Amino acid sequence: MATKINVQAANKEAISRIQTAVPVLKGLGIAKDIVPGMKKNLILHAGPPITWDRMSGPMKGAVMGALIYEGFAKTPEEAEKVAASPEIEYAPWHEHNGVGPMAGVATASMPVWIVENKTHGNRAYCTLNEGLGKVLRYGAYSEEVIARLNWMRDVLGPVLRETLEIKGEINLKSMIAQALQMGDEVHNRNRAGTSLLFRELAPALLDTSASPSDKKRVLEFINGNDHFFLNLSMPAAKAILQSAEWIDGSTILTVMCRNGTDFGIRVAGLKDRWFTAPAQVVKGLLFPGFSESDCNPDIGDSAITETCGIGGFAMAAAPAIVKFVGGSASDALNYTQKMYEITEAESTTFQIPSLDFRGSPTGINLLKVCETGILPQINTGIAHKQPGIGQVGAGLVNPPMKCFEDALEAYVETYVP
Amino acid sequence: MSSLKTLFNEDVKVFNVGIPSFADDLKRQGVPVVHVEWRPPAGGNKRVIELLDRIKAWQAEYQTQAKS
């Protein structure tokens, strides 16, 4: 029990660290060389901890694809057996200083972005975005998926690594701030962010030693994928929030994430603890030919953006996103306005033009969520519940209240005499 | 009495607090409604209220001690 704790002061410190964090893109490396604790038989995944037997379809599909990619198996059937064996270990990305969109599966030989918080020195990692359609992060593991991952390791990764060595670090905080002014919320709309990144990378990329055809293909790959920037907005948000871990007595959330089975949260003042409850069904717009019965529950670490006050919290900056996730432009405005009720501050950097450049709602306060009953607003992609199929739509979702109630219970148990 | 007369002789103006379906019903009948979103603290969950009260009392004690 710690009686001499001023909760308000602890939260002020957490907010100060969040506001002053400056995530920059430092470079790119191979997971086994740079991600803390990474090893050949370890599979990192999105969301809170989970075992193979409890994994959802898309998570299982992504694990099977990753095992084929790493050479542990030659066929999906073989991969399924290996995945269930004690040879393979699983851990959340969040316990290894990183994040992964949707299934979020990462293995030892994958290239990963290195994002550093210049103010506090912490680093966060994330794989490179594969694009839409049949991709590993949605649980697809067909030959085309593995071939793309091989190309990303052998060509895309090395070319981007050399590009960044020539270009030098890129300030992601100011890039996200600019993207918000250009109609992104940097979770499900990353068109502006990707365009800004392209402009930063292209000149240096042309100076690399890569062949003209590789340069062309890399530029086309980035240009052809509006979500390319997502895998940078996520580790940027992670690097910002890591700086608030762990502050005694603070009730500010540092993680919200999902593994397709459970939703999990972490709180700045409750070191290393997870609070989980069943992930919810996402309500939204489905691609033609799919119905709600095809949808997997909420999945992915991308809710780190909402935890950081962007994504669903900044939907007022991105009215066009409703064409992707459903609802109207006024709904987008309302979602953002409602989030001020459960946050501690307004971002000093991320501003919403349609709200007279008001700072985005920042620092989710566990106590405010419990008191008001208002749940954080998340927008997200929807994966098919069967492995190997991929994305079926996008929509809106909230975390289960039980995560917050359990965290509140643990907070009182830890601190209140 | 005069206000009652006014009430029945003028168009109804409604503020609805809490349950949105009451406002929706009136809207369907063409009655102008301003809906105010409200819910009881902690959604009425007694355990959550108790926990929040304990935190408030603990912090009030801290403030008192800090001043003395």
Image: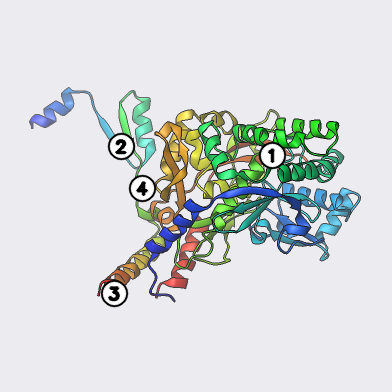
**Dot 4 and dot 2 residues touching (CB under 8 Å):** no
Q: How is the image coloured?
A: rainbow
Disc 3 and disc 4 on one polypeptide chain:
yes
Task: Please tell me in which quadrant of the rendered image residue B9 appears.
Answer: top left
Is residue A78 placed above or below A187 in the rendered structure?
below
Q: As displayed, is residue A176 above or below residue B29? A: below
Q: Tell me the amino acid under the disc marked 3.
A: Gln
Q: Which residue is mark 3?
A: B65
Badge 3: chain ID: B
* Residue type (three-letter) at the residue carrying disc 1: Asp
Name which of mark 3 and mark 4 comes first in the sequence.
Answer: 4
Q: Nearer the viewer, residue A36 or A262?
A: A36
CA distance for labels 3 and 2: 44 Å
Kind of residue sitting beneath label 4? Arg
- The relative height of residue A357 versus residue A39 in the rendered view (above or below) is above
Callout 4: chain: B
Neighbours of disc 3 within 10 Å: few (<14), some (14-19), many (20+): few
Which one is in front, B23 or A387? A387
* Separation of marks 3 and 1 at Cα, in angstroms: 57 Å
Camera-side mark, 3 or 4: 3
Residue bearing the label numbered 2: B16
